Amino acid sequence: MSPVDTTEPDPSAIANIPKPPFVRLPHPSRMFATRAERFRTLAEGHDLKPYLLFLADLCAAQAAIQDGLPKLAPLDAAVLARAREHKMPPLDRGHFTADPAFEAPFSRLIAAAEQMTMPAVAQAALLRVKAADAAAREGMVQNVLAEAIPVEALAEHVFVAAALQVHFARLAERLPGREMESVGDGVCPSCGGAPASTLLVSWPPPAGARYCSCSLCGTMWNHLRSKCTLCGSTSKIAFQEIEGTGGTIKAETCEDCHGYMKMMNQQNDRFLDPIADDVATLGLDLLVRELGFRRGGINPFLIGY
Amino acid sequence: MNMELSRRSFMIGAGAGLAGTTIGALGFGEIEAAHALSIRPFKLAQTKEARSSCPYCAVCCGMMIFSAESKAEKGKMEVTHIEGDVDHPVNRGTLCPKGAGAIDYIRAKTRVKYPMYRKPGADKFERVSWDFAMDRIAKLMKDDRDANFVEKNRDGVTVNRWPTMAFLSGSSVTNETGWVTYKVSRGLGMLQIENQARI
């Protein structure tokens, strides 16, 4: 580009319309602290205030336990190359086991959670997680990674999922974001997870692009607007919003697969968080469900909807 | 892919009478139920987002056209907003002032929605059917072509020209439409074909 103090025409600046980066990797050091803050803000005057405050504490714990965690093993170049070659996510959740690297964030999170105030049933569930032997813990880890939570142990899995979020965010943070490619519609290019919700981001370039946010590792990846994240169809998309809310958070419904996914417009409110605002807009889920749509977003704090 | 309760476990859980959501399982079932009740009076409003390309010039910028339920006509959708399509490789969300003002073009009172005809000697336009319009245009074109068609030039070489007619086509058209435009107009012998391919 020519310097600004010349009057020479500069056609290169005209064509300089940036392409949105495909992947935005998570920053676990900031992500959980910001989310805790957001939960606290949302809790004010909300029907679900005690629950949102509980989650604020849990996210604050997710943020606090990261200081001084042992370093992760370096990335294996062969694994990355193989993943890229076969269009697979580089973090292989199918072969993940509760290895020693996961031990530290897990035990720290359980210890931090013990300091939180919570209802007696949640307390009891936390104690059961703490007391679980290696095999039981492994089972819970696999349930969360398989995105199939047994209904009789929902509370226990919340704590396991919270620990896994921290661990996977740390793993995903180190991936080579610029080289990563799509592994399929609605599938996280880092860990193969499903999105919790989608955001129309406020950060350029260019603002207004849509990103799915992974429910597990927090990676954000670009996804076409007005296209179902669940089945990839573009033909029968509509948006539902609660009347009078200004359309900041909408549910994108698809008549082809009868699923829906929330879409949050950060251009209206730049503090929107894909997990926290998802929980806080449970009302939207309740209303959209009555239209016969199935919730497509995965949120470990909102299972059962 | 969906985080669903596994079915087998759900049966066991239902037998034990446990709550089926995370919120309930963590002991917040009461506020969850209260929230579900308090949200009932609220209503949903439906909006749509459709992709289109800008009608003005041959750059063909992508547009997102937003619509909501019309307040004037119940049960109908109405365009509420137009912006550049961020996902479109040509313009990445940008629009020029003409494109950005396209909503006024849609809502304009003077917008022509039907074929209009002003009879020779009349002082105003009247609405006519498409059949009438097509027949009338075809008839006038045929008359003009019969009168002015040049089959051979002065040297006796076959040229098949129709120099008194020109063809103005759209700018934001696909290759297929462009092909048809060319075949129709050249086939008739027209020499001036214009596609308004500029801003």
Image (cartoon, coloured by chain):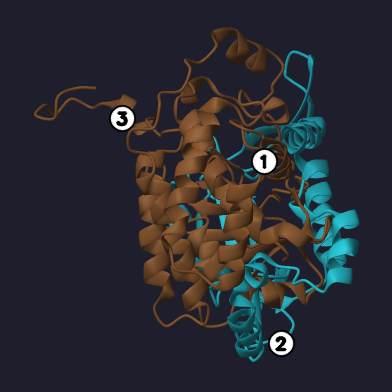
Chain colours: A brown, B cyan
Secondary element type, mark 2: loop
In the displayed structure image, the side of residue A96 where residue A72 appears, left or right:
left
Query: Looking at the image, can residue A271 be seen?
Result: no
Could you say which is closer to the camera, residue A159 or residue A7?
Answer: A159
Query: If the image is split into quadrants, where does the N terminus of chain B sit?
Result: top right
Taking B110 as reference, is A204 above or below it? Answer: above
B172 with respect to B57 (left or right):
right
Q: Amino acid at mark 2?
A: Lys
Q: Are marks 2 and 3 on the same chain?
A: no
The answer to whether dots 1 and 3 both sit on one chain is yes
**Which label sits on residue A133?**
1
> To which residue does mark 2 refer?
B74
Residue B72: percent from left, percent from top: 63, 88
Q: Which residue is mark 3?
A: A13
**Closer mark to the observer between disc 1 and disc 2:** 1
Rendering coords of residue B34 (x, y %): 61, 87
Report, in whole angstroms, how far the alpha carbon at label 1 lies from the one at label 3: 61 Å
Q: Quadrant of residue B184?
A: top right
- For the residue pair A185 and A40, the one nearer the viewer reads as A40
Query: How many neighbours does mark 2 have within 10 angstroms: few (below 14), some (14-19), or many (20 or more)?
Result: few
Chain under callout 3:
A
Q: Chain of mark 2?
A: B
Chain letter, disc 1 residue: A
Q: Position of residue A240 (x, y in %)?
A: 65, 71
| Other residues around mark 1 within 10 Å, as few (<14) / some (14–19) / many (≥20) | few
The amino acid sitting under disc 1 is Asp
Q: Residues within 10 Å of mark 3 (few under 14, many from 20)?
A: few
Q: Residue at x 61, y 31 (%)?
A: A189
Cα–Cα span, label 2 and label 3? 47 Å
Determine the residue positioned at 46% across, 56% down: A113
Question: Is label 3 in a helix, a strand or a loop?
Answer: helix
Q: Position of residue B111 (x, y in %)?
A: 59, 70
